[in-house]
Amino acid sequence: MAEAILNSLTMNRGRFKAYSAGSHPAGQVSPLAIKQLRSAGLQTDGLRSKDWNEFANFGAPVMDFVFTVCDDAAKEACPVWPGQPMTAHWGQPDPAAVEGTDEQKRRAFLQAFGALRNRISIFVSLPLDKLDRLAIKKKLDEIGKS
């Protein structure tokens, strides 16, 4: 969802290009994630389940920022990213792990979407061209705590 949110917020501005990947990809984007994105009016074309190693290999897009969002990701060893991007952990419970009724699952995706949208909106509003690397890192960590 973060990939679609960030790309929608910066569309036509060329400021960022977002990619989403995980340490244990499911092999398909969750249908509930697709449903949530579409209900918010966001594009879902081209979204696919990706392993984060795809972006750690030679020839992969160079990342300026890497955000881990799954609560479990904070406990895992991340790959070494080419180009030494800034990293931050914006922990969020994995909505795909929620068990229960269809309504409880839908609500989990809605809550995750809202939290991600809020954090990403704050991120894209930062005057990155006016901040040094340390100030940016501090802001990213603050966003992750919001």
Image: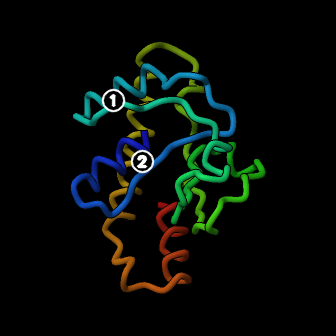
Of 110 and 59, nearer the camera is 59
Tell me: residue 42, above or below residue 87: above
Q: Residues within 10 Å of mark 1 (few under 14, many from 20)?
A: few
Tag 1, which secondary structure? loop
Q: Amino acid at mark 2?
A: Ala
Q: Which quadrant does the N terminus fall into? A: top left
Contact (Cβ within 8 Å) of mark 1 with mark 2: no
Tell me: residue 61, above or below residue 133: above
Of 76 and 18, nearer the camera is 18
Disc 2: which residue? 115
Is residue 57 found left or right of 123 in the rendered image? right
Is residue 103 found left or right of 79 in the rendered image? left
Q: Residues within 10 Å of mark 2 (few under 14, many from 20)?
A: some
- What whole-number distance in Å separates the C-alpha atoms at marks 1 and 2? 22 Å
Disc 1: which residue? 45
Residue at image position (51%, 43%) is 20
Residue at image position (53%, 82%) is 133
Of 75 and 106, nearer the camera is 75
